[in-house]
Image: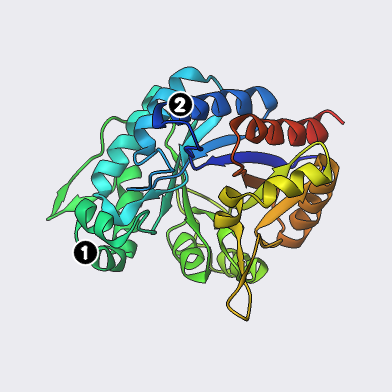
Amino acid sequence: MKGLKLSILDLVPVFENRNDTYALEQAVLLARTAELLGYTRYWIAEHHGMPHLACPSPEVLLGHIGARTERIRIGSGALLLPHYSPLKVAESFRLLASLYPGRIDLGLGRAPGGNAHVSMALSGNFLENVRKMPDKLREVAELLQDSYIYEGEPVGARPSPPVQPEVWLLGTNKKSAEYAAEFGMGYVFGQFMSDVDGEEVLRSYRESFVPSTLCSKPKVIVTIGVICAETEDEAMQLANSSATATLFQKELTDGKTEAYSERKLLVGTSRSIKTSLEQMSEMYGVDEFMLVTMVPDYYKRLRSYELLAQELWNS
């Protein structure tokens, strides 16, 4: 598995009998551990109004985590662009990139990140904001390339970092892949949330990619759920927990659900998961996977990442 890179997507979950502050402390611990283990990136998801997810503002938490780590790339997975002004987004991530040069990733998404009323309270008509997504992506790209014009006047995003943030678009279908290709951005395919054919989505991205100063050639990361344990039985028990099933469950044709979809979630020992990742790497033509481990125990979540890292890089 030489050359394969692994990264982490953290939803910053609040598990039973714990509070938000504890969950945020665990996010810092996970980022610091990921750095020590050799993971490439640590990204934070954005959610609003969800009692069991503790991060509505990735850029704020990234500022704290950047100060507690030294080398690992850190970023948003994703910052939900329909809610925000492109200028404010560019300013926030240029500030992070100035504080932590060469380490910042701006991952963008177009999901609401919460229910309808939370979305309306946050930014008004979400569907109208989603309709503006291509314009907002273009503006973010122009701001990061210092070429943005507003009403005939140049507008810059300060500060100006020594190394620009890497820009990625996250998605689960061909529409998001088309946007990433059109605007010359890296693409992160959310396999853990998608039932579509990932090979076709990634092929369309690569074939349509337009090089930019942000990204000169197609770059792909595949995000997949992973539960790794000492034994297959323990891994299966964790996979069948309610916290895991809610995120990775599979809809059946009769309207019922399975505990999880094997397309979305890899479950097993470090050796079996390593084999699965090797197969996916060949199938998708990618060398980087971003892992989501959602089990209702902070220690076992951390242990899952540790076991896999030991198998991949110390075996």
Q: Residue at x 47, y 37 (%)?
A: 14
Q: Locate the N terminus by quadrant.
A: top right
Provide residue 150's location: percent of width, then percent of height: 16, 53
Tell me if residue 123 comes above or below residue 250 in the rendering. above
Q: Amino acid at mark 1?
A: Asn
Provide residue 26's location: percent of width, then percent of height: 52, 27
Tell me if residue 29 comes above or below residue 230 in the rendering. above
The answer to whether any part of residue 100 appears in the image is no
Residue marked by disc 1: 125
Q: Locate the C terminus by quadrant.
A: top right
Provide residue 58's location: percent of width, then percent of height: 39, 38
Badge 2 element: helix
Lower position in the chain sequence, tag 1 or tag 2: 2
Badge 1 element: loop
Left or right: 174 in relation to 85: right
Q: Quadrant of residue 111?
A: bottom left
**Residue placed most toward the observer, 20 or 200:** 20
Residue marked by disc 2: 22
The answer to whether any part of residue 156 appears in the image is yes
Mark 1: few/some/many CA within 10 Å (<14, 14-19, 20+)? some
**Residue placed most toward the observer, 253 or 79:** 253
Nearest to viewer (mark 1 / mark 2): 2
**Residue placed most toward the observer, 284 or 252:** 252
Q: Residue at x 84, y 49 (%)?
A: 275
Q: Residue at x 32, y 62 (%)?
A: 133
